[in-house]
Image: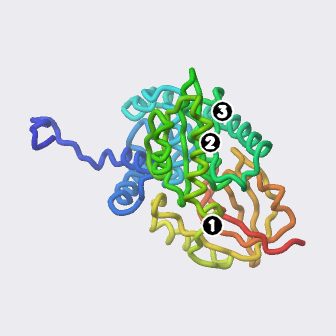
Amino acid sequence: LREDGFWGNKRYPNLKEYLDLVALGTIGDVVPLIGENRIFARFGLESITEGKRVGLRALKEVSGVGDSAVDSNVASFRLIPRINAAGRIGSPEDAVRLLLTDDMNEAMEIAGKLDTCNKERQRMGKIILKEILNMIETTTDPKKVNSFVLSSNKWHQGIIGIVASRLVERYNRPAILISVKDGIGKGSGRSLAGFNLINGLKRCDPMLLSYGGHKYAAGISIEEKNIKEFSNRFNKITGEDLTASDLIPQTIIDAQCNLSSIDHDLISQFDMLAPFGNMNPEPVLCAKNMRVITPTIVGNNHLRMNISGDGTSYNSIWFSKGHFAETLAESTFDIAFTPQINYWNGTSNIQLKMKDMAFTKFY
C-alpha cells in the first residue's frame, strides 16, 4: 500500500496497535503458535490485557475477565467464543461493530448481545450433544466404529462444528455432523492426529457437492440422498487409515513430580513459554498415587475435584469430563496435569488443570 501511494499524506499506521486482533485471529483459528505467530500472539494478548480497544474491554467485562491478565486460555474460552457466537446464531456484523466502536456504551450493549448469543449457543449445543450421545449409545458400540457421520434436520448449522469437537474429545474418533434442510446437508467435521480429514473427504469427492478445510477441521455440502452412502464410505476410509493405537487417546507427559513441588515459582517459569496453543502445548506433569476427593460437576459438564497426595492437596478442574464423576469415587490415580493460577472473585490460587488420569488401585 505504501509503495502504491495509498496513504498519501495520511498518517501511516503503527501496525503494533492491531496485534490484539491478530492474536484473536491466530488463536481462534488454531494457527501454530510458533515462530512469528507466537511473538504476535504474545504481544497481542498483552495489548488485550491493557484494554486499549474499547470493544474488547467491554467483552472482558461481560465474560467475567475484568482486569485480569488475558492469556491464550482466556482468549480461547472466554473472548473468542463470544465473538464467534455472533456469526453462528446471530449476525457477524455485531462482532465487527464491537471491534470498531470507540463508544463504551455502545460496546457494552453489543458485548451483552454477544454474551446472550453465546449462552444460547451453549444451550443449543447441550441439547444436540445429549441427543447424539443417546443416539450413539443406544444404536452402536462406539468402540466398534472408526468414525461418526450423523445427520438431522433439527440441528442448527452454526452449532454442529462445536458438537463434533466434543464427540472427538469423548470417543477419539473423527466425527462429521450434518444439518439437513430442503434436501441439502451442510456438514461440519473434526478429526484427530492420526487421520487427515481433508484427504479423507477427497476420497469421497463423487458423493459431495463441495468440501473444504484442513487436516483437523472441514465443512461439506451433500445431497440428503447421498448421506448414507457417504457415511459408509467415510467409515471404511477411516478404518483403512487409522490403526488401533490411533483410536486410543494418548497424553504426552513432560516430567514426573511430587505434588509438593508445585508452587508459584514453577508456574512463573512455565509462563515464560506462553502463549500456549497449537504446536506449543502447555507443559504436562505427572504425579502418582493421588487421591481424588469430592468430584463435582460444575458449569458446562466440567469436573471439579480436590487432588491429595505427598502431604499436599490442590483443587483441580477437568474440562468437559463431568461424565467421569461417579467413576472417580474411592480410588487412587496417577494424574497428568498442568498447574496454573486460578483467578476468581479477586483471589488467586494454584489449580491443577487435568489432562488425563489412570487407575492405580481400588480400596
- Left or right for 28, reference 52: right
Disc on the earlier residue, 1 or 2: 2
Q: How far apart, in angstroms, are the residues tagged by discs 1 and 2?
A: 21 Å
Q: How far apart, in angstroms, are the residues tagged by discs 3 and 1?
A: 33 Å
Q: Residue at x 49, y 54 (%)?
A: 196
Q: How far apart, in angstroms, are the residues tagged by discs 3 and 2?
A: 19 Å
| Residue 350 at least partly seen | no
Res 245 label? 1
Q: Quadrant of the N terminus?
A: top left
Q: Residue at x 44, y 49 (%)?
A: 214
- When the figure is inspected, residue 124 is found, relative to residue 331, above or below; the finding is above
| Residue 32 at least partly seen | yes
Q: Name the residue nearer the viewer: 196 or 342.
A: 196
Circle 3: is it few (<14), some (14-19), or many (20+) Cα within 10 Å?
Answer: some
Q: Name the residue nearer the viewer: 28 or 64.
A: 28
Q: Give the residue number, with chain letter if any, for mark 3.
A: 124
Tell which tag, 3 or 2, sits nearer the viewer.
2
